[in-house]
Amino acid sequence: MELEPQKIFVEGEEKVAHKVRELYTKIMSLRGKNFKGEKTYPGADLIYEIGTSLQKKYGLMDVYKYYLYHIMIGSTMGREKCIFFDFPGDDSILNLLEKAKKELIINLSPESNATMLA
């Protein structure tokens, strides 16, 4: 039996989705410079790493069944087209983005705009 996409949000999902959108926006807006003085995009690089890791673990096609994955990669897929809301446990998109935010704050130089993440 194949699972059907959910047509509506379950209680609490909208708040989580909003928080993930906020984190995504903040992380993606980070800019820095490398040792050559060239612009870098550490937030985009980290989100790419998270997405790639989830693709390897769950399968390239299966990650697209998760609504919060779409938010994390900047997709506009609606909730009604996704079978699942979020990954289980430590793979939760909200948890992964919170960890990414902390990692970026710790590792970025003071010249970057990482202070906006706090």
Image (spheres, grey):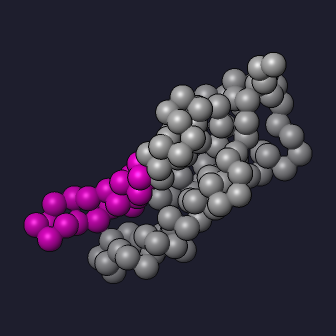
| Residue 47 place in picture, x, y as percent | 45, 52
Quadrant in the picture for the C terminus: bottom right
| Residue 4 place in picture, x, y as percent | 79, 22
Q: Is residue 53 magenta?
A: no
Q: Residue furthest right?
A: 11
Does residue 89 show up?
A: yes
Give the mark count.
Answer: 0
Identified at 84% across, 50% down, the residue is 12
Does residue 94 show up?
A: no
Image height of 116 relative to 59, above or below: below
- Residue span colored magenta: 28-49
Quadrant in the picture for the N terminus: top right
The image quarter containing residue 108 is: bottom left
Image height of 116 relative to 82, above or below: below
Identified at 53% across, 46% down, the residue is 57
**Image side of residue 79 versus residue 62, left or right:** right
Q: Quick one: 1 or 94, which is closer to the camera?
A: 1
Identified at 53% across, 36% down, the residue is 59
**Image side of residue 84 versus residue 49, left or right:** right
The image quarter containing residue 36 is: bottom left
